Image: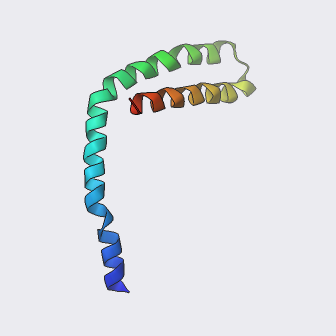
Amino acid sequence: INAISEVAIGVPFPSLGALAATVGAKMESSYASTLIANWQVWTVPQLFNFALVPPPLRVPFANVVAVLWSAILSTIVHK
Protein backbone atom coordinates (compact mmCIF):
# COMPACT_ATOMS: atom_id res chain seq x y z
CA ILE A 1 0.00 0.00 0.00
CA ASN A 2 2.82 2.43 0.79
CA ALA A 3 4.50 1.99 -2.60
CA ILE A 4 1.22 2.69 -4.39
CA SER A 5 0.49 5.79 -2.32
CA GLU A 6 4.01 7.13 -2.91
CA VAL A 7 3.58 6.75 -6.67
CA ALA A 8 0.07 8.23 -6.57
CA ILE A 9 1.30 11.22 -4.59
CA GLY A 10 4.43 11.72 -6.71
CA VAL A 11 2.79 11.60 -10.14
CA PRO A 12 0.92 14.94 -10.01
CA PHE A 13 3.93 17.01 -8.92
CA PRO A 14 5.73 17.32 -12.28
CA SER A 15 2.48 18.44 -13.91
CA LEU A 16 1.95 20.95 -11.09
CA GLY A 17 5.32 22.49 -11.94
CA ALA A 18 4.25 22.92 -15.56
CA LEU A 19 0.94 24.38 -14.42
CA ALA A 20 2.70 26.84 -12.12
CA ALA A 21 4.93 27.98 -15.00
CA THR A 22 1.88 28.51 -17.22
CA VAL A 23 0.02 30.43 -14.52
CA GLY A 24 3.09 32.55 -13.79
CA ALA A 25 3.47 33.46 -17.47
CA LYS A 26 -0.24 34.31 -17.73
CA MET A 27 -0.06 36.51 -14.62
CA GLU A 28 3.01 38.28 -15.93
CA SER A 29 1.30 39.10 -19.21
CA SER A 30 -2.09 40.20 -17.87
CA TYR A 31 -1.52 41.46 -14.30
CA ALA A 32 -1.37 45.18 -15.09
CA SER A 33 -4.44 45.17 -17.33
CA THR A 34 -6.37 43.09 -14.81
CA LEU A 35 -5.44 45.44 -11.96
CA ILE A 36 -6.56 48.48 -13.96
CA ALA A 37 -9.82 46.73 -14.87
CA ASN A 38 -10.28 45.95 -11.16
CA TRP A 39 -9.97 49.63 -10.28
CA GLN A 40 -12.34 50.61 -13.09
CA VAL A 41 -14.98 48.09 -12.04
CA TRP A 42 -14.88 48.40 -8.25
CA THR A 43 -14.19 52.07 -7.49
CA VAL A 44 -17.48 53.66 -8.55
CA PRO A 45 -19.78 50.87 -7.29
CA GLN A 46 -18.07 50.87 -3.89
CA LEU A 47 -18.36 54.67 -3.60
CA PHE A 48 -22.03 54.34 -4.54
CA ASN A 49 -22.45 51.41 -2.16
CA PHE A 50 -21.11 53.18 0.92
CA ALA A 51 -22.65 56.56 0.10
CA LEU A 52 -26.18 55.65 -0.97
CA VAL A 53 -27.05 51.99 -0.40
CA PRO A 54 -28.71 51.21 2.95
CA PRO A 55 -26.52 49.03 5.20
CA PRO A 56 -28.69 45.88 4.96
CA LEU A 57 -28.41 45.97 1.15
CA ARG A 58 -24.67 46.65 0.87
CA VAL A 59 -23.60 43.01 0.81
CA PRO A 60 -26.14 41.97 -1.85
CA PHE A 61 -25.14 44.98 -3.96
CA ALA A 62 -21.45 44.10 -3.66
CA ASN A 63 -22.29 40.48 -4.59
CA VAL A 64 -23.96 41.63 -7.81
CA VAL A 65 -20.89 43.67 -8.70
CA ALA A 66 -18.71 40.65 -7.81
CA VAL A 67 -20.62 38.49 -10.31
CA LEU A 68 -19.98 41.08 -13.01
CA TRP A 69 -16.31 41.25 -12.00
CA SER A 70 -16.06 37.46 -12.23
CA ALA A 71 -17.42 37.62 -15.77
CA ILE A 72 -14.82 40.26 -16.66
CA LEU A 73 -12.02 38.16 -15.15
CA SER A 74 -13.22 35.12 -17.05
CA THR A 75 -13.10 37.12 -20.28
CA ILE A 76 -9.58 38.35 -19.54
CA VAL A 77 -8.33 34.85 -18.70
CA HIS A 78 -9.79 33.26 -21.83
CA LYS A 79 -8.39 35.78 -24.32
Q: Quadrant of residue 5?
A: bottom left
Q: Residue at x 38, y 24 (%)?
A: 35
Q: Residue at x 33, y 28 (%)?
A: 31
What residue occupies the far front of the structure in this picture? 79
Q: Quadrant of residue 36?
A: top left
Q: Nearer the viewer, residue 46 or 63?
A: 63
Please say if 44 is above or below 3: above
Q: In the image, 65: left or right of 10? A: right
Q: Quadrant of residue 47?
A: top right
Q: In the image, 1: left or right of 49? A: left
Label count reads 0
* Quarter the N terminus occupies: bottom left
Q: In the image, 63: left or right of 4? A: right
Q: Residue at x 74, y 27 (%)?
A: 56
Q: Residue at x 63, y 17 (%)?
A: 50
Name the spot of residue 65 as percent of width and height, x first.
59, 24
What residue occupies the far bottom of the structure in this picture? 1
Q: How is the image coloured?
A: rainbow
Q: Nearer the viewer, residue 71 or 79?
A: 79
* Quarter the C terminus occupies: top left
Name the spot of residue 2 as percent of width and height, x first.
34, 84
Name the spot of residue 9 as percent of width and height, x first.
34, 71
Please say if 15 is above or below 50: below
